[in-house]
Amino acid sequence: MSGREMPNHLPEGLPIPVPELDGLSAPYWNGLRENRLLVQRCSHCDAWQFGPEWICNACHAFDPAWTEIEPCGRIFSWERVWHSSHATLRQHLPYVAVLVEIPHAGSVRMVGNLLGDPLQAVTIGTAVEGCFEHHPGSSPPYSLLQWRVSSPRE
Amino acid sequence: MSKPGDQRTLRGRVAVVGIGETDYYRHGASPDPEFKLALKAILAACKDAGLDPRDIDGFSSYSDDRNDASRLAAALGTHRLRTATMQWGGGGGGCCAAVANAAASIVAGLADCVVVFRALAQGQYGRFGQVSGVETISGEKAYLMPYGVLAPPQRFAMKVQRYMYEHGVSQDAQRAIALASYHHAQANPRAVMHGKPLDREKYDASRWIVEPFHLYDCCMENDGAAALVLVAEERAREFRQKPVFLLGAAIGSGHRSGAIPHNAPHYASAGFDTVAPDLYRMAGLGPCDVGTVQAYENFTGGVVMALAEHGFFEPEQANDFLTLENLIAPSGRLPLNTSGGNLAECYMHGFELVIEAVRQVRGTSTSQGRRNDVAMVIGGPMVTPASNLLLGSEAAL
């Protein structure tokens, strides 16, 4: 049991994600709060898209539909952070951030933290699964999507 | 190849006739406010050229420079303002584009004498490497900051990590770039790291900022200002200094380079896959014609990518090419960052690199390359839009 296996991987106090004033990413952030990972998939040409935009970059149809996907993928790249760029993190070093590629959704990518031992060896290509991390007490409340290495039997 | 008679080229159409810099300081150490630093650099560039500052009729900058062109024109009492250009995009991606935009204004007949500058007092307005006072965040950073991917080191490390994985690039290649900058800074009394040499052991023993970046792979944060004066080719010989001609310039990035967060199709890239060919095409030159390179080091890994994308070596050859011996003036294969650059001279957001390329062509660098007819500047690896320049002597026209 590592002391880092806490409900929230990084401490409270980092910037809180909120949708833009025009609401572009609101379905994504609202989805995370309900344990759902939503990305855009154009209903006209089936192209996947993340981060969201008001138009499909492939066929130019407006308002690509939001589609729920299974939160699993593989590590496309990673970094281990040893120097804090925010006062909140000074006592929480190191930590690992990963860029996860989601092959079953057009290989869109998203950034999260890799849960578990912050000193673990990290290998590009490793299968990972998503974990929803909720911050209900924050103002405003929000949720993140974190990642852990998939267990071999799954 | 572009010819001087072609309509749509900047090749040989404009020249740098003056350069100026303030003293360079550690962040927070400038005795002057940022606007005063801008004025000092501009006046120094005018003095270098032998130009009355009132004859400036345009300003060009980048990265949301705070020192507004109209305020500068009012403060300097310029007779009139005819162009005021800001390159979109953050980071140092615009350090060459600002010169290109000024050149385009002159070639198009909008202005005659344009100052290109960057002033940055990070001690007064905040560092890029620290985040504070941000309660909520939207847009690209919302997908990054809550996970501790806050500042440039964390934003770019994953890109470099992926590039190293795809092409087998070693940590030693990054180290060679850091060592070259520090080596050149020891000859440059302007350099903030002058008198503070770096060797392999010190690099290897330095702490990680974020893997794969050691402390010395990361640029400094500084206070200062730098400026140059650009005029049309027809007037280039009227001034005090040997004119340095623009041979080529290019701006931009490839297909969907700006897809956030970290969703660019060609992810492990410095962003020059389309921009470098444009530069060589305008200049009518290739990598073998380049005498020295000033390549923006936000992080050394970005320089590895940028040099490969400009055709100096294949990515798989990076470990062989990137050695200290190959990167130092006068006799290395490709003298790199000959003033010390962002790592060791001053992080003037890359504009000190443009100034150094001018000095190389003039033959006045403190670490002069063997060839000084053609000098390259590469601005802002891993950001979009990026930009680059080729400068050259009259003989190179």
Image: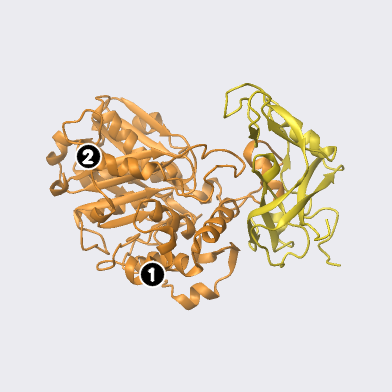
Chain colours: A yellow, B orange
Q: Position of residue A151 (x, y in %)?
A: 81, 60
Subunit of label 1: B
Callout 2 amino acid: Met
Q: Does residue A75 sit above or below B62 in this rendering? A: below
| Foreground residue among A84 and B268 | B268
Image quadrant containing the C terminus of chain A = bottom right
Task: Name the residue: 63% across, 62% down.
Answer: A83
> Measured from the top left, where is residue B210 in percent x and y?
60, 61
Q: Amino acid at mark 1?
A: Thr
Dot 1: within a 10 Å radius of its alpha carbon, few (fewer than 14), some, or many (20 or more) residues? many
Quarter of the image for residue B46 reads top left
Q: Is residue A62 left or right of residue B299?
A: right
Q: Is residue B357 above or below residue B177?
A: above
Which is nearer the eye, A47 or B151?
A47
Residue B364 visible from this viewpoint: yes
Sooner in the amino-acid sequence: mark 2 or mark 1:
2
10 Å neighbourhood of mark 2: few (<14), some, or many (≥20)?
Answer: few
Query: Distance from label 2 to label 1 (Cα)?
Result: 32 Å
Per the image, label 2 sits on a secondary structure element best described as loop
Q: Position of residue B36 (x, y in %)?
A: 40, 43
The residue that mark 1 highlights is B323
> Residue A103 falls in which quadrant of the image?
top right
- For label 2, the residue is B1
- Same chain under badges 2 and 1? The reply is yes
Does residue A125 sit above or below A45 in this rendering? below
Rendered residue at 32%/64% (across/down): B188
Q: Could you tell me which chain the residue with mark 2 belongs to? A: B
